[in-house]
Amino acid sequence: MKRFQTLLTRTFLFFCIILSVIIFQGCTSSSNPSLAAKRYKMFYDTGIRDLEKGRLEEAIGNFSDVPESSEYYQKAQNQIEYVNQRLDEKITIEYGTIYKCTKCGKVLKKFIKQKNCKRRERANFNINEERASLCPDCERSEKQAEFERKKLERQAAIDQMKRYEQGIGPEEVAVTRINISKWESGYTAGENCQFVAMGINVLNTGDSTTHANPNYFTLSTPDGYTVNPDTDTTYGLSRHFDAIDLSPNSYTYGWLIFHIPIKDYYILHYKTYDSSVDKKIIPQNI
Ligand SMILES: [Zn+2]
């Protein structure tokens, strides 16, 4: 019986020891000075690694985590001072705009410039700002297409000019020749003006005789400035447009010269008592 009691006591003591070891370890792990020191050293070492890789802001963050109680505190503070000095260093950076071509999707840099600034100012530059724009290749092809479109438009306008056009009344008007100049028959055009000489057809499509007359023609600028045929130059021409009666299905042809301000286009009006034709005139030699 005594042997059994001794065994029980021994077993109890054994468990007590085990338990105390567990409790002792459990209590000390949170305040173990060597473990805390290891953690602070880790902050410091991470800061050094950040520094080596040029991550200056992150380095400052890690050095700042080292508390006063740590033996690395002073070293960390020295590093913070050093990093702050580096952040104040002047460096040359490139800045500009990165954009995507809206047509082909190519990503390009635009307006790249260099600027001396402090390292800490770097983040202020909009290096990644995207702008809607065309790349040089697409811009060139767009311009070429625009040029071709204008050329076709102009050609269509010239073709239209050459065709007979009817307004109100039986007469149809076509302009088959144009000659632009600064001098006509010894006369010089005024400042910002030019002579527009036109070979004009008038066709009578009606079933009775009509009268065609050079005085029925006027030429207007797009903003409405209107002139009569220039008598000094027009009537010096051997084939000037002359007054004539047109029997049904007959036409006449002759030249008229207008002295008018230089513009991109004009409107030629043909107006009788009961007829009216307006024609767009492109001032180009044809
Ligand atoms: Zn493009």
Image: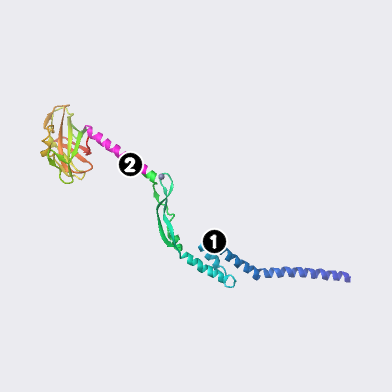
223 or 282, which is in the foreground?
282
In the picture, measured across the screen, residue 143 lies left or right of residue 119, that is left
| Disc 2 target residue | 146
Quarter of the rendered structure image containing ligand 1: top left
Q: Position of residue 243 (x, y in %)?
A: 11, 32
| Front: mark 1 or 2 | 1
Asked if residue 175 lies left or right of residue 79, the reply is left
Residue drawn at x 60%, y 67% as measured from the top left: 41
Q: Main secondary structure of the magenta part?
A: helix
Q: Which residue type carries mark 1?
A: Glu
Q: Are marks 1 and 2 in contact (CB under 8 Å)?
A: no
Label 1, secondary structure: give it.
helix
Which stretch is magenta?
A: 140-164
Question: Which residue does the numbered mark 1 point to in the structure image?
Answer: 52
Q: Secondary structure at mark 2?
A: helix
Cβ of mark 1 under 8 A from ligand 1? no
